[in-house]
Amino acid sequence: MKPANHPYHHGNLRQELLRAAEAALEARGVQQLSLRELSRELGVSHASPQRHFATKQDLINALATVGFQRFDAIAAKATAAARGQDFKARLTKVALAHLGFALKHPALLALMFEAKRQPALPPELLTALQSAFSHIPRILKEGQEAGKIVPGDPHRLALTIGAVVQGLVAIAVDGKIKGDSLKVIVPEVIGQVLNGLSTGKAKA
Amino acid sequence: MKPANHPYHHGNLRQELLRAAEAALEARGVQQLSLRELSRELGVSHASPQRHFATKQDLINALATVGFQRFDAIAAKATAAARGQDFKARLTKVALAHLGFALKHPALLALMFEAKRQPALPPELLTALQSAFSHIPRILKEGQEAGKIVPGDPHRLALTIGAVVQGLVAIAVDGKIKGDSLKVIVPEVIGQVLNGLSTGKAKA
DNA sequence: ACATCATTGTTGTCAATGACTACATTCTTG
DNA sequence: CAAGAATGTAGTCATTGACAACAATGATGT
């Protein structure tokens, strides 16, 4: 009846739903996320989301998946940009990339980590997740092979750095680190930790 | 009508609600938490929770508050038990206490951190939260005053250690650290980081 | 071209939920 | 022991997620 408004087939509903959902998520939180409200917002019927997300949890999982994919893309770009640079510089770049993402999309990040806790992770979510968390261990492994840091179990070393970055992210999201000081604090913290892991003891 | 079953006044409904809510939380997740279901479980009417928690969010906030209080108590006990011990030992004890709590109550911890993200924190929640996170900075400050670690800004140092512990917690909750190896890994990671922060460079 | 069928969107409905109101029972306290 | 505060109950409402039956569009093979 209203082909002027929109054709019967939206044509891009899935993407729009994800977009609107992310906006609503950042604005009102996960608890307030309502499929029907999203439908209203997009001018579609209340049942149309079902064609793209069988259940509300599926929409949430899809949100988490694209979140991890973006997370991954940003980290990959950061490592690429730092190619050839100092080992520590690369690590710092990736950490900053993580933090930048966290500060830009705090609610999405929270949703991502909540989704990670699901007992049965959807395969795509698992893939996106693994890829997103592969960068730091890879850089560490390279640094280890170059003899820059203590040998030991690479898994544990990655754990240490991963813990630091993850913790920094959690703290930064809480607003405990003011925006600009990030570029100062992150290299400092990374430096302190690397200092404890490095083979040579150059700096004080 | 049924004084045999239970008296008109439950007498302890608030506590029981919190208990049942925590159980349901760990069993089925926050999303599935239902006030009516809790009421049924406790054999009370569907409206009775309102007398104790005006809104569902209030129940969640109360859950988060008791969570932080327990968190705080455990950390306090750990520091007390390690009184007089090595600086590093005390830090490790607190970190282990944090991790122990996290592994015992993963869903509650997730809820706590989600609750922390609320724009307007209830005062009691804020108090409990601040108290729970006061232990590591205090130990660090003591260590700093004793000249064990680099002077610098104490806030930043606390940030570093806090980040590490928080990160370890997040990783441990994911099951990435198998139960027993905690006692090995945590001191190791703490040692590595402290190594980067310490004034003297004793160990390799 | 065009019939067939899968996609995608719509309307209608249902049970469950959180919140609200009016009312009942019990406890407290002056 | 009377008055009122606490606490619990029954009833109701709008909203929600899920489901089913149906409609419109798009794609495919011949």
Image (cartoon, coloured by chain):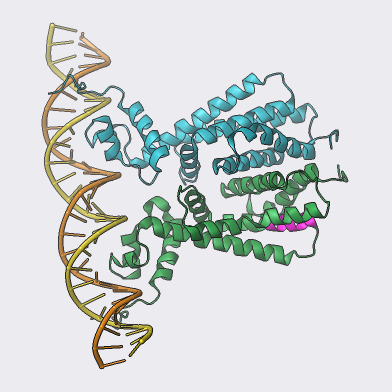
Chain colours: A cyan, B green, C yellow, D orange
Query: Which quadrant of the structure image shows residue B203?
Result: top right
Residue A112 percent across, percent down from the top left: 48, 39
- Along the line of sight, the residue nearer the viewer: B142 or A83: B142
Residue B49 percent across, percent down from the top left: 34, 65
- Along the line of sight, the residue nearer the viewer: B144 or B3: B144
Asked whether residue A50 is in view, the answer is: no
The answer to whether A118 appears left or right of B32 in the picture is right
Q: Is residue B37 magenta?
A: no
Q: Residue drawn at (82%, 51%), measured in percent from left and top?
A: B148
Asked whether residue B75 is in view, the answer is: yes
Position above or below: B102 against B14: above
Residue A2 percent across, percent down from the top left: 15, 23
- Along the line of sight, the residue nearer the viewer: B146 or D11: B146
Position above or below: B132 against C6: below
The answer to whether D23 appears left or right of A197 in the picture is left
Position above or below: B14 against A68: below
Position above or below: B134 against A85: below
Q: Residue drawn at (38%, 47%), measured in percent from left and top?
A: A31
Give the magenta range: B87-94
